[in-house]
Amino acid sequence: MNESKPIGVFDSGVGGLTVLRALRAAMPAENFIYLGDTARLPYGTKSAETVVRYSLQCADALIKRRVRCLVVACNTASASALGALREHHPTLPVIGVVEPGAAAAVAASATQHIAVIGTEGTISGGAYQTAIHRLNPAARVTSRACSLFVSMAEEGWTEGPIAEAVASRYLDPIFQNAGAPDTLVLGCTHFPALATAIRAVLPRHVNIVDSATITAAAVLQLVGGNSARVGTRGAVAWLATDGAARFARVGSAFLGERLDAEAIDIIDL
């Protein structure tokens, strides 16, 4: 692979910035191009066919900018479109967040009873269940769509009584029973923003798997670090399909650093 080329990352909006944040921590010398398809979010309520179409368009926009690897930083797109992306671009490494997250969950669970929460599209598609059972056919998977978490994360309602009450409403039916799962997969890139509230309502022994850091490790293993630029800080080119100001405002919290709206190019897919 040509180390001078950037790594492309796309998501339906800003949630994938949690993955980009982990990628930059793991590969600080790399250059990235991030595309948020903000004009058409959320992907989680769309049909699988629509998500595939949108994902192929996002990939084409990044490939035109000569990326050397494609990271699908969206659980819904990873669940619905990863196969199509790999089929359309057989020579380009394409990495999603589902497979690394499933592997981490199987490794973390002592009982092999694993809970997965995500958007409606991710859960109904069964991608995590399939990926987990591919690794351990005997594993038990309990899943639940927690769509309200997405809006809460983007509004900044990530901690405190309201966030914990919503988390409790979603998770108590799963974890307040005998034989409950011992591992929880955050199957949406927005959900790490609510990790404090989620942790507060879970039994202490439950492991939480955030696929962002696991995905970053998988990308590093596949493409390697940019050895030609060790000691330097890579750059990020920012693309969105609508709303640069909102992308910058909301995205800053997910990325953990300030984004400048003027640095975001609005493109048409």
Image (cartoon, rainbow, N blue to C red):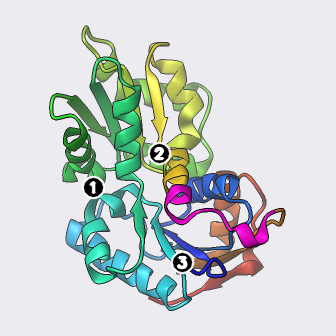
Q: Where is residue 36 in the image (x, y as percent from the top left)?
A: 53, 71
In-image side of 51 versus 215 (left or right): left
C-alpha span from label 2 to label 3: 25 Å
Badge nearest the viewer, 3 or 1:
3
Residue range (magenta)? 219-230
Residue at position x 52%, y 81% from top?
A: 241
Check if mark 2's residue and mark 3's residue have beta carbons within 8 Å. Answer: no
**Residue 92 versus residue 190 in the image, above or below:** below
Residue 211 is labelled as 2
Q: Quadrant of residue 262?
A: bottom right
Which one is nearer the viewer's eye here, 14 or 132?
A: 132
In-image side of 49 versus 17 (left or right): left
**Residue 29 versus residue 65 in the image, above or below:** above
Which secondary structure class fits the magenta region best?
helix
In-image side of 129 versus 152 (left or right): left
- Pointer 1 residue: 121
C-alpha span from label 1 to label 2: 17 Å
Query: Who comes first in sequence, dot 2 or dot 3?
Result: 3
